[in-house]
Image (cartoon, grey):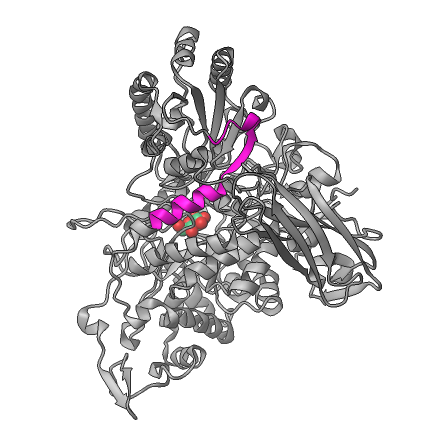
Amino acid sequence: MKKTIIKTARISLLTALVISNISWSSLSDEENNPPILTLNGFTFRDLNKNGKLDIYEDTRLSIHERAVDLVKKMTDEEKANFLMGTGMPGFDGIKPVIGAIEGRVPGAAGGTYEIKRLGIPAIIVADGPAGLRIKPIRKDDKNTYYCTAFPVGTALASTWNEALIEKVGKAMGNEVKEYGVDVLLAPALNIHRNPLCGRNFEYYSEDPLVSGKIASAMVKGIQSNGVGTSIKHFAANNQETNRLSINEHISERAMREIYLKGFEIAVKESNPWTVMSSYNLINGTYTSARKDLLTEILRNEWGFKGIVMTDWFGGFAGAESIMAGSSNVTQQLSAGNDLLMPGIEAQKKAILENINNKNLSKEVVDKNVERILELVLKSPIMENYKYSNKPNLKENAQITRQAAAEGMILLKNDKGVLPFTNKKGKIAVFGVTSYDFISGGTGSGDVNEAYTVSLLDGLKNSGYSIDNELKAAYTPFVAKVKDAEMESRKKEGFLALPKRLPELKLDKEEVDKHAVSSELAIITIGRNSGEGGDRKVDNDFNLAQDEVELINNVSEAFHAKGKKVVVILNIGGVIETASWKDKVDAILLSWQPGQEGGNSVADVFSGKVNPSGKLTMTFPIKYEDTPSAKNWLGTPADDPKNVTYEEGVYVGYRYYNTFNVKPSYEFGFGNSYTTFDYSDIKLSSSTFNSSITVSVTVKNTGKTAGKEVVQLYLSAPSKSIDKPKEELKAFAKTKDLKPGESQTLKLTLSPKDLASFIENQNAWIAEAGTYKVMTGASSLDIKKSVEFTVPNEITVEKVKKAFEQETPIKELKQ
Ligand code: BGC
């Protein structure tokens, strides 16, 4: 394990420097305003100042035509510079390529090379995905540059509301554009293969359809501002331990059906400007060097038109090889990975050498350069967009408040304890996290927001009375443990993993006292994690002893007085719930809900918002039930190098439902303050032709207005193909239905929705036979079903073989 820690620490230093110092020289005013040429009444910018209209300056032509012209004008040296980012100033042993002064947007993650003589500016890329990550304070500048911390990816996906996510994306993109950034390094849509992945909070789901649909909505929203996105990390970046060098052995079927599917949906539905390849290897080759992945599948099969960039230092086998500059640039560029990020001097040297000795063909170089040029030509900086540095922070705070509330999941609500409407009686607020609410995880997915509303403040803002004596006991304790945690993290650097704060020990008499003086107890359980490390089972997935004691003591004391206990889960990933859920009356899963967190919780708590979030992953009874637990992190255990995905396509509910493993809370689950009835399920036809439409009517049968997420699962014949018992194939969310109101939802299935990937035929195939369509409120709560038949087997799509395995994988079968 020691080795792993050292590697992580060194990379953290690298990334810390990227975030804090990276820079680009900005264009001077004169350069920003090149001479104007007039032709037939049209005006053009004479970017290269040669007094004539060059093809690439002619904005009537397509971006592609202009890029092709530009490539012809570039020298090999300029091309080599252009194929990588402008580096990371100040890191020992790595000379920055270009621009060592603090640039246009301090704190951004990187940028491209500027070709002054041709008037081609540097574009700037910044993280993502919970909001824009830039430095909030700048040297010698009185202004601040705070960004909105939106709910983390998992929280957003839990809304199952594509229109709302698009609205969030639009708000996020407004900050990107108005702070002068061209591409947001988001959204992140890796699959939750295992609950312990330290970056699951950034990702959406264990299911590829949810991931793909939510990512598409996010991309559409962000890009509606005229800025770009980078869907990441392509692909199968499912663990943080040894992330720069882990070799993942995965079958082609699992790749295509589980780990690529979400990306396929996002590429086809939303046209992201860029894709970020991942750090890991798949079947022996870095993803950034896999032609099957980046060219065959992404471009030829799916029709992707943008650029692929590496993740930061992707394709190096760890810190030592970064220092030595020993990545295989030829293989990466030839595979279709256009841009190497953040870019180091040794890569430029290698590119030039390989151009000269013809290892790297002119066609490859020109194609990659052309694609990067197309990106630059459509970026706001190319138009010299006058960004205001004043995004709509006020409006965006309202959007994050709304989105967070809609992503919250009511896991339990015995006897309707929530909504809690008594604003006179006091609420006893327990748990350190109540006072130090967690808006989002750490690492590059963190955001520099101006504030985070704590649970306590959120409740107060909504007019609740708080047990101030209890607050007085917590406040100094929280300040002390928080300071100590921050200090220890500071010492470890940017990627230091957050540590759980210990709970305040309260003796029995004290808790009893609060049970007398207060009407209700709230306990917040908090979890934080981040880039560079995975979570642990003890004291993280499982509750720590001090948390168990807190739940026990508070529940006993309050229940003895006939009062209720509500648990708020302010977490970024799945935890164990089965052993303690019966002890409390209500559980609200708030996730890490962004900067308005406390207000969003209060909105649900008070009933201002009726919860309508549903789980996008399974909460198992115990960690060991997880299908990937057996080979999580890989071998050898003390410094994993190889990991085999033996569970194959049986990820998440596909496993639990097929193998009848009972979860604590199943995929798709979430309660409401009202009830819904499903009726009138109908098919457009009883046999499948080129598509089939399912309609179902949902009625609000309770007393409160609310929304329902209707999930459509398909159970396929599985005669010759080993298939999960059912798979999510479509979903839709109703509008806010008033009591008694109904809505009919229509969901359409395409041939590919019926198909599985059959490796020995290199094809997506839908078997002939009877298919069962099941609509319901969760993967285990099916309300209405109907069947259709496929008369003859359908070969939906033939593809080229990909992901050749090094060694055969023994995959789980039924
Ligand atoms: C992360 C990416 C991020 C990049 C730039 C990497 O360490 O894996 O998600 O976009 O850094 O900050």
Q: Does the magenta stretch include residue 254?
A: no
Name the one closer to the observer, 15 or 236. Answer: 236
Residue 184: % across, % down = 40, 57
Q: Residue at x 54, y 59 (%)?
A: 266
Residue 692 as seen in the image, left or right of residue 1: right
Quarter of the picture containing the C terminus is top right
**Residue 301, image x and y in percent?**
62, 67
In the rendered structure, the answer to whether residue 658 lies left or right of residue 533 reads right
Name, please, the residue furthest toward the bottom. Answer: 40
In this view of the protein, which residue sits in the foreground, 729 or 195? 729
Q: Nearer the viewer, residue 499 or 508?
A: 508
Q: What is the magenta range?
A: 396-419
Majority secondary structure of magenta residues: helix
The residue sitting at 25% across, 50% down in the picture is: 145
The total of numbered circles placed on residues is 0
* Placement of 60 over or under 759, stated as above or below: below
Q: Is residue 472 something one can see in this rendering?
A: yes
Left or right position of 178 against 340: left
Q: Where is residue 228 in the image (x, y as percent from the top left)?
A: 41, 62
- Residue 536 lies, with reference to residue 105, above or below; the image says above
Q: Where is residue 10 in the image (x, y as percent from the top left)?
A: 40, 40
